[in-house]
Structure formats: C-alpha cells, structure tokens
C-alpha cells in the first residue's frame, strides 16, 4: 500500500501544471496560484497520510516562493487557450475576458500568456465595430505596451493600438505612427500591418471625399485627389497579397479591403475577382465568409465571367498561418496589378 501511495504521489508531481525554474538550478513543480511584488504562491501536492484510500482526493499545500529566487516559470500547456488565441472572434469575448481577468496580474512575468490574451481580447473587441469596445481595446493595447515582458507582444500591441486609434477617430496620429513604423521596421509582418492601417485611412478619406463631392468627375480640383486616394488605398490593401509567403489572414483582409474600394467605385467585376481570390486561395480566413456571400449576391450572368479561372487553378496552396512573407512574386504582382488601373 505504501508503495502504491508513493507512486501516486510521484505521478502527481510529474503531472504538475507549472514549473518554477529557480536561479539555483532547482525545479519547483506545482500550480502557480498567485503573486505579489515579493513572492509567488505555489500549490504543491503533499504525500497522502497513512491509510489514505488510493482513490482519495489529492492533498496540497500553498507555499511562498520569493520572486527574486525565480529565474522563470514554465506554464503548463493549455490547448483550449491556444485555440482561442489562434483566431479570436467577437463570439469568444466573454471567455477571453474571463481569461484576461485572471491573467492580468501576470502581465510582467516572463513567459506568461497574459500579453497574448490581452492582445487577442483587444483584437476581438475591434472586430465588433463598436466604438465603446474599440476604446476598451485601445486601453488594453496601451497596457500591454507598457507592461508586457516580451518585445514581440509589445510590438503586436502597438499594431493593435494603431488600429484602435483609427477605430476611435484618432486616425491622424495613427497614420503618423504607421508611417514611422513602415519606414523603420524590417519585419515584413509589422510592415504589412502598418500598410493596412494606412490603407484604411486612405479608404476612409476616399469615401468622405466622394460623399462630399458626388459629382467629382466635373471638378478638375477634385479629380486628382480622388485618383490619388483610389490608387493609394488599392496599392496598400493589395500589398500583402503580392507576397508568395504572405500570412493568409492579412492577404485575405487586404483583398477584401480592395474589393470594398471597387464596390464603392462601381467596379463590381474587379470586386468579384478579389472575392474569388479570397474564396479560392484563403478559404479558412475571416473574409472568406463575406466574400462568398458577395459572390452569391451577384447576377448569374456576371458570375459566369471568370477570366482568371485558369490562373487561380494553377496557384500553389496558401502557406501555413504565421509564415514569414517572401519577396513579391511576379505572377502575383501581375495578377493583382491587372485588377487595378492607374486611373479610373
């Protein structure tokens, strides 16, 4: 019996959720239950008392571990959390918020998932299109930028903050920061995000100009600005799709933005081609749903016209999510440049 209980106790240690790696080289397994400025609280299993039944509930104790003695913490894998962080949606906001409330105190702790949870939470809030939620997302991203331990998380938060600034009406400062970011960064993923923010700003300016000047074709002072904003928005939206290794979600998002420009300007056939590219090349992305709905909404005669059908059939499958973009391929560049005239 003692041998069985000892084996059960050893197994419980081996399956502990978290591991504290001490500066002394020691490993402290258990479940990290809390922290303050001085110490971590660790729940550790205790040996079962003599005579304990094999199926009895495990016994644990809470011990304090000085933070100054801890090198880092290896947090237990959490497949459910990883699934949420991979592609957060507005429907998951309550669950992500619950996770964030628990994780917030861990934001500055090395290797904790707190910053990733906050960034996912902010991203889901922005997807709703609700100005109040965008304001909350802005505060989340600021908090991560100020307190996260990982520079990569801080950079993701900065990108999110710029999107939130646009969503809350502070596009001018967001554009300025995005321009600065696009001029100094060497990270293709960051550059793509900065260009998307600039595309959104040009898109908004174009829509405002057309709304204020419905007869713009007759105004020689408005025509050049209309063409500039039109081409600028398309160039920036289509930028991610010119990369052979572009991250799928960004490429699809940009193509859908370009489709929106074409819809705005009455070029429904070009919008259809963008939507088809999304549905064919990036079927698992968020824009794929609305792209397919748009295709289905068009007259059957228009849908029958598909000059790029053969070209799409020859496209290689899209790369894995989060793959680093390569240099733009000539094939993709020609394909999308054909959709976008220099003046319209």
Image: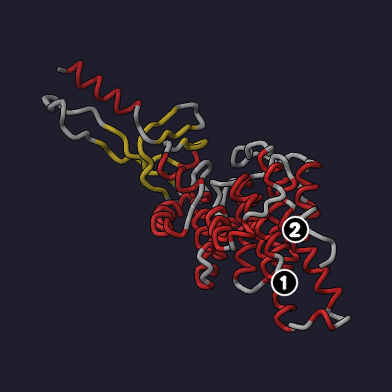
Residue drawn at x 62%, y 50% is 278
Of residue 214 and residue 197, the one placed in the foreground of this image is 214
Q: Which mark is residue 159?
A: none
Distance from Cα at disc 1 to Cα at disc 2: 17 Å
* Residue 258 appearing in the image: no
Rendered-image quadrant of the C terminus: bottom right
State the image coordinates of residue 203 (x, y, percent, origin top left).
71, 68
State the image coordinates of residue 4 (x, y, percent, origin top left).
19, 18
* Residue 103 appearing in the image: yes
State the image coordinates of residue 12 (x, y, percent, origin top left).
29, 28
The residue indicated by pointer 2 is 236
The quarter holding residue 246 reads top right
Rendered-image quadrant of the N terminus: top left
The answer to whether residue 294 is above or below residue 288 is below
The residue indicated by pointer 1 is 172
- In the drawing, does residue 90 fall left or right of residue 264? left
Of residue 235 and residue 321, the one placed in the foreground of this image is 235
- In the drawing, does residue 31 fall left or right of residue 164? left
């Amino acid at each position: 019996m003692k041998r069985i209980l000892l084996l059960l106790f050893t197994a419980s240690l081996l399956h502990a959720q978290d591991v504290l790696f001490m500066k002394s080289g020691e490993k402290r397994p258990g479940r990290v239950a809390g922290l303050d400025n001085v110490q971590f609280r660790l729940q550790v299993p205790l040996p079962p008392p003599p005579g304990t039944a094999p199926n009895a509930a495990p016994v644990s104790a809470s011990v304090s571990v000085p933070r100054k003695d801890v090198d880092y913490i290896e947090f237990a894998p959490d497949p459910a959390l990883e699934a949420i962080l991979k592609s957060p949606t507005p429907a998951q906001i309550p669950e992500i918020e619950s996770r964030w409330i628990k994780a917030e105190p861990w934001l500055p702790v090395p290797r904790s998932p707190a910053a990733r949870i906050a960034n996912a939470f902010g991203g889901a809030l922005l997807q709703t299109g609700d100005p109040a939620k965008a304001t909350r997302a802005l505060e989340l991203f600021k908090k991560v930028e100020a307190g996260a331990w990982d520079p990569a998380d801080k950079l993701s938060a900065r990108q999110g903050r710029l999107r939130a600034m646009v969503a809350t009406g502070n596009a001018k400062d967001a554009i300025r920061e995005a321009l600065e970011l696009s001029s100094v960064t060497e990270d293709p993923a960051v550059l793509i995000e900065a260009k998307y923010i600039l595309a959104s700003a040009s898109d908004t300016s174009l829509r405002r100009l057309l709304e204020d000047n419905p007869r713009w074709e007759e105004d020689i002072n408005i025509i050049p600005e209309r063409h500039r904003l039109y081409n600028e928005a398309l160039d920036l939206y289509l930028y991610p799709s010119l990369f052979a290794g572009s991250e799928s979600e960004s490429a699809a998002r940009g193509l859908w933005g370009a489709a929106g420009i074409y819809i705005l300007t009455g070029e429904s056939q070009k919008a259809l081609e963008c939507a088809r590219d999304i549905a064919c090349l990036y079927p698992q992305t968020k824009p794929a749903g609305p792209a397919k709905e748009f295709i289905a909404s068009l007259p059957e005669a228009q849908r029958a016209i598909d000059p790029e059908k053969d070209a799409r059939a020859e496209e290689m499958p899209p790369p894995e999510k989060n793959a680093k973009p390569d240099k733009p391929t000539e094939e993709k560049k020609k394909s999308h440049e054909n959709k976008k005239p220099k003046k319209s």
